[in-house]
Amino acid sequence: MVKKIDIPKVALAASLDLAATVGWRDVSLRDIAEEAGVSLVQLRGIYPSKGAILDAFACEIDSAVLAGDSAELAAEPARDRLFDVMMRRFDALCDYRDAVRSIIAAGAADPCAALGGACRLTRSMHWMLEAAGIESSGIAGRLRAKGLAAIHIDVMRTWLNDDSADMAKTMSALDKRLEQADRVMANLCRLTRSRDDDPAPATSEAA
C-alpha cells in the first residue's frame, strides 16, 4: 500500500496516465485507485470526485507557474509579463499534453464537466494575472480573468498540435491573441473617454 502522505501525488499521476492512455471520459474512480495501488477509501479521503482530481491538477500547474516568478520582469510592460507567465503555463503542461487533450475531449461531451472546467480555468487565470502583476480582483479583475481564459482556450488549440521544440507556433498564437486583446481594450478606453468628454445635451427652458 502507498503511504498516506504519497496518495495525492500518486493518485494524481495515475489519473493523468489513465487519461492519456485510456481516455478521461472512460476512466472510473475505481480505475484510478487500482492504478495508484490504493483503496477506494483512501482515494475518497483525498479526491472525492474526478472533478477534485482535475482541481488538484490545475493547482499543480498554477504552482509550477508561480514558482517561476521573476522580479526581473517587473519593469516590463504588462503584456510582456503576461506573455511570459502564459508561456510558462504551456511549458508546465507539456508533459501532460495527451492527458490534457483527453480531458478537453471529455468536457466537450459533458456540459457539466465543461462548466466545471470553465470555472476551474477562470480561477487559474486569476493567479496568472497576479503572477504578471495585473490586478485580478473586483469586477474588472473578473473580466480580465474571463478574457484571459478565452485566450488560453484559443491558444491551446495551437499548443495541442505544436510539436516544435521551442513551441514557436504557440508563442506566435499567444502573441497574436494578446495583441488583439490589447487593441480591444484600447478601443474600449477611447470609447469611454469620448463619452465622458461629450458635453451634456442642452436642455431648453420652459416657455
Image (cartoon, rainbow, N blue to C red):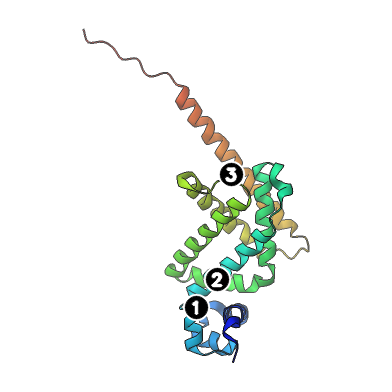
Residue 181, disc: 3
Tell me if residue 71 comes above or below residue 196 in the rendering: below
Marks 1 and 2: in contact by CB < 8 Å?
A: yes
Q: Quadrant of residue 68?
A: bottom right
Residue 197, disc: none
Residue 56, disc: 2
Cα–Cα gap, marks 1 and 3: 37 Å
Q: Secondary structure at mark 3?
A: helix
Answer with left or right where residue 133 lies relative to residue 137: right
Answer with left or right where residue 38 lies relative to residue 86: left
Residue 47, disc: 1
Marks 2 and 3: in contact by CB < 8 Å?
A: no
Quadrant where the C terminus sits is top left
Tell me if residue 72 comes above or below residue 68 in the rendering: above
Q: Nearer the viewer, residue 50 or 5?
A: 5
Residue 196 visible at all: yes
Q: Quadrant of residue 58?
A: bottom right
